[in-house]
Each structure stands twice: as C-alpha cells, then as structure tokens.
Image (cartoon, rainbow, N blue to C red):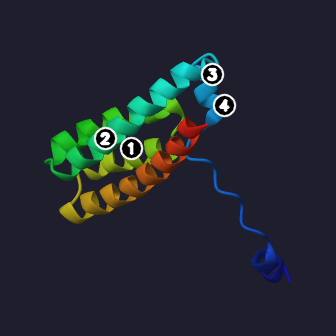
Amino acid sequence: MAQAAMLTAAPAPEAPAIDRVHLKQMTFGDRSLERELLQLFDRQAELLIARMRASEAPVLASLAHTLKGSALGVGANAVAESAAAAENAAAGSPAQRAAALDCLAEVIAAARVEIAALLRV
C-alpha cells in the first residue's frame, strides 16, 4: 500500500537554478547590482567550463573552485555543488573528470537559461 502511494505522489518541484532570495540579500535588493552580478556570472561560467574542459587536473580543480565561489555568491546552488564535485573529481580518472564536467555543464546551462529570463524582466 505504501509503495502505491509513493508511485502516485507528485514529484517534488525542482529548485530554481538561481536562489533569488539569496541574490537579493547579497545585493541589498539593488536590482541593477543583481543584473550586473548575473551578467558577470553568466560570462564567467561559460568561460570557465570551456577552460576546465581543456585543462589538466590541477588547473581544472582551481577553476572549479573559483566557479564554486562565484556560484555561491549569486545563489546558483546547483552550480556550486557540481563545481565542488568537479573540483573533487579532478584528482580522479579522466572518465571521472569528464563525467563531472558533463554534469557541471548541464547545471550551468540551466542556470544560464534562468539568468537570461531574469535579465529580460
């Protein structure tokens, strides 16, 4: 009976790619500062994922660490978590690094889509 209830329960809604409450706190509610930070993060994330894909393990770890900090600053929590995973995977095999970077690229793409929507408003 419990299994049937679990199968029919609606899935939990996905968290937004950008925690807007956190972003608002970090920018003291200044909408122009929010926009500027989102634009900077958007460009940085795009640049860093490309660099990480072309980097050796130590550089990849450093770039992932940088991205993690930036993501936490704007409330891109999934990006921060995936960047931390990529930072840790840098010490692993090439396959582990590639898998971590693929996951990171996916959450960056989701964040960039949300950022584009937020910048249109």
Tell me, yes or no, whether the two marked residues, 3 and 4, touch with CB atoms within 8 Å: yes
Q: Residue furthest right?
A: 1
Viewer-closest of 20 and 56: 20
CA gap between label 1 and label 3 equals 23 Å
Q: Judging from the image, what secondary structure is the residue with disc 1 in? A: helix
The label nearer to you, 1 versus 2, is 2
Q: Which residue is mark 1?
A: 84
- Mark 2 secondary-structure assignment: helix
Count of numbered circles in the view: 4
Instruction: Tell me: residue 57, above or below residue 26.
Output: below
Describe residue 16's horizontal placement relative to residue 113 as left or right: right
Checking the image for residue 64, the label placed there is 2
- When the figure is inspected, residue 28 is found, relative to residue 55, above or below; the finding is above
Q: Which mark is residue 95?
A: none
Q: Amino acid at mark 3?
A: Gln
Q: Residue at x 61, y 29 (%)?
A: 22
Crowding at mark 3 (Cα within 10 Å: few <14, some 14-19, many 20+)? few
Q: Quadrant of the N terminus?
A: bottom right
Answer few, some or many: residues within 10 Å of disc 1's Cα (few below 14, many 20 plus, some between 14 and 19).
many
> Where residue 25 is drawn, which disc sits there?
3
Choose between 8 and 49: the one closer to the eye. Answer: 49
State which mark lies toward you, 1 or 3. Answer: 3
**Gap in Å between the C-alphas at discs 4 and 2?**
24 Å
Which numbered disc, 1 or 2, marks the residue that appears first in the sequence? 2
Query: Mark 3 against mark 2, which lies toward the viewer?
Result: 3
Could you say which quadrant of the image residue 9 lies in? bottom right
**Mark 1 or mark 4, which has the lower sequence index?**
4
The residue where tag 4 is placed is 21
